[in-house]
Amino acid sequence: MQYRSLGRTGVMVSPLCVGTMNFGWKTSEADSIRIMDAAFDAGINFFDTADMYAAGESERIVGKWMQDKRDDIVLATKFWNPMGPGPNDRGGSRYYIMKAVEASLKRLNTDHIDLYQIHRPPMELEQDETLRALDDLVRQGKVRYIGTSTYPGWMIVESIFVSEKLGLNRYISEQPPYSLADRRIENTILPVCQRYGLAVLPWSPLAGGLLAGKYPPNEQAAADSRVVELDYLYRDRITPRARLFAQEVAHVAADVGMPLPELALLWVKEQPGITSPIIGPRTMEHLQAALNIIDKTLDADIAARLDELNPPGSAVADFFNTSGWMKMRIPRE
């Protein structure tokens, strides 16, 4: 396995990162542990969770699993989302960060977090409020590095300027949504990260199941699918056009003798500037499909065919526009 540098840090991570959002939610503790064991045995050393996943259960399961291998794991978690009913049980304030990190450390049963990430940009705050608190955690040894998730490009640049001006530790990574179906980060986010040496850890490389082949054209979605369970989020994403696009990518995958989700994941892994796509296996079969491509490369002619289906910087539907910063005009015809 060819390990990759985590941005400017020199820390080496596997070219795939196991995301644990399903653990303790759709995947039982026992199955979660089996999946992590199999990933670790295959050489994956990078695991990402968040305090909000299964209301803390994901962190607890990861913490239980990694006890005898802590020094061999690069552990990432996130904060920002609500973890209680109060107005200060969320966000990017010093008040909340100091409380959130202690809760995560306890659930993870560890004395430090390798990569502590803010889950969404706190638009209502000045950046020094969040950065000063995170810098203190690094200096205390509770956190090794800090990162962002779903930040706009201008905010990443501003954060670096604030860190340099105030002598604070700077963000070393960004977690953006990125897939063959939604390539908008190529316009600003990816160039910014490459210019300033941030690791790029894409989430949802299969576009919410679209590129896993879950939503063929003209077929009713399964009752337990995300497009049904989370209609308010997915109605603008799993569109007729998006379904047709997935079918076209599936034709390319068939031509090269690969399952659709494996080709889609391989494409993300092999894009310039990408460090480690985050996979979210719910089952052992999902993990194995991801492991199948971990040492593969993407032929230039196949990449060119995929570019024709969705050109660089474009999107086939309004995927993952969670904070408004990726808004663009997407034709529906």
Image (cartoon, grey):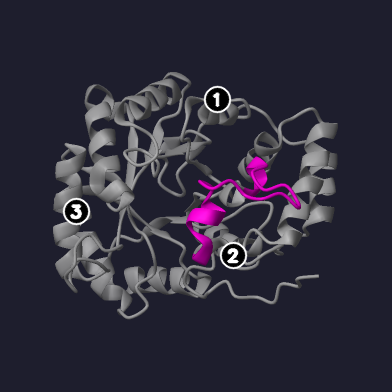
Residue 131 point in image, percent of width and height:
28, 67
Nearest-to-viewer mark from 3 and 2: 2
Q: How far across and down, in percent of the image, does residue 325 sit? A: 52, 74
Going by the numbered disc 2, the residue's amino acid type is Arg
Q: Is residue 227 magenta?
A: yes
Q: Which residue is mark 1?
A: 288
Q: Residues within 10 Å of mark 1 (few under 14, many from 20)?
A: some
Rate crowding at label 2 as few (under 14), some (14 to 19) or many (20 or more) other CA atoms within 10 Å. few
Q: Is residue 66 visible?
A: no
Give the Cα distance between marks 3 and 1.
Answer: 32 Å
* Range shown magenta: 210-232
**Of pointers 1 and 2, the one earlier in the residue sequence:** 2
The image quadrant that residue 107 belongs to is top left
Could you say where residue 220 lies in the image, as x and y percent from the top left? Answer: 66, 50
Can you tell which mark lies on residue 235? 2
Callout 3: helix, strand or loop?
helix
* Mark 3 crowdedness (10 Å alpha carbons): few <14, some 14-19, many ≥20: many
Going by the numbered disc 1, the residue's amino acid type is Gln
Lower position in the chain sequence, tag 3 or tag 2 = 3
Q: Amino acid at mark 3?
A: Val
Indicate whether 105 appears above or below 191.
above
Tell me which residue sits at (64%, 64%) in the image.
184
Q: Are marks 3 and 1 in contact (CB under 8 Å)?
A: no
Viewport quadrant of the C terminus: bottom right
Q: Which residue is mark 3?
A: 101
